[in-house]
Image (cartoon, rainbow, N blue to C red):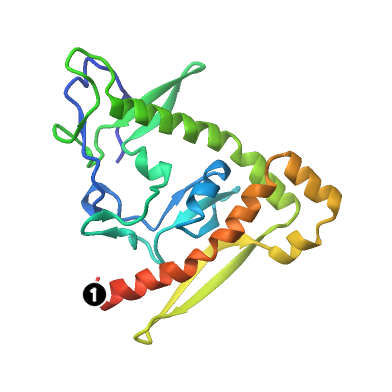
Amino acid sequence: MPNPVLLNNVQHKDLHIATERRAALGDNVMFATTFPAEFRTLQAYYPIVFRKSDDGTSFEPVALFGFQQGENLFLGEDGWDAPEVPLMIERQPFLIGRQGEELMVHVDLDHPRVGRTGEAVFLPHGGVTEYLERINSVLLTIHQGMQSLPAFVEALLRHELLEGFTFDIELDDGSQNRLAGFYTIHEERLAALDGAALARLHQAGHLQAVYMAIASLSQFRALIGRKNRAHAAGR
């Protein structure tokens, strides 16, 4: 179970974070939540699709790393095999909490990245390291990005632009795989929107993210290639 506590330079003066990318450090995940402002960066490497939120009341965009739970095809012996690591992955084991109206950095002390080796969080005399400065920036970007997510999803639902899909994959050795339970942009409905609806999406800042999500689907071919190579290697 996660054990998030408020980060401070007294109790956590010796805290270090392992920053390499390995399954043992929690990187063996199938996907990571993302947000519209990150789509442009991620679409060059990962398919961006949508899933129902854990409470089942809405949807959230995710960057896909594999085709089944616990599978990350970007994770290899040399770490993460892509130039961009999604911010939701990079920020671990840190997260944002609130103290009144103030945003505060928390750390999950039970996360496998936490220990006494790796990147120092604080300087010997209590100052913030460059590593923690980067994490603070990452967390703020995530917070701001997630603030825009409800309006983006609401616009997609209002125009009925999300559709469920099932993706059947035949690997080079003939084995069958199926990806189900995710949603993508309904391109025909998007194309059928009138100019006024498209203008509203553009003015709200949603239209670019919609097209970035569509463009990202071309990465499924590369993801299948990774799956074939992993399967051939017996992983």
Kind of residue at disc 1: Ala
Q: Secondary structure at mark 1?
A: loop
Can you say which quadrant of the picture contains the C terminus? bottom left
- The relative height of residue 187 versus residue 130 in the rendered view (above or below) is below
Q: Which residue does the numbered mark 1 point to in the structure image?
A: 233
- The relative height of residue 7 versus residue 65 in the rendered view (above or below) is above
Residue 202's quadrant in the figure? top right
Q: Residue placed at 62% from the left, 48% from the top?
A: 209
Q: Where is residue 142 shown, x and y percent of the image?
A: 48, 35
Toward the viewer: 126 or 60?
126
Residue most toward the left?
A: 116
Q: Where is residue 117 shown, x and y percent of the image?
A: 14, 34
- The relative height of residue 108 versus residue 26 in the rendered view (above or below) is above
Q: Where is residue 82 shown, x and y percent of the image?
A: 36, 55
Toward the viewer: 167 or 41?
41
One can see residue 4 in this view:
no
Q: Residue placed at 36% from the left, 31% from the top?
A: 135
Q: Where is residue 37 shown, x and y percent of the image?
A: 56, 41
One can see residue 129 in this view:
yes
Q: Residue placed at 58% from the left, 44% from the top?
A: 36
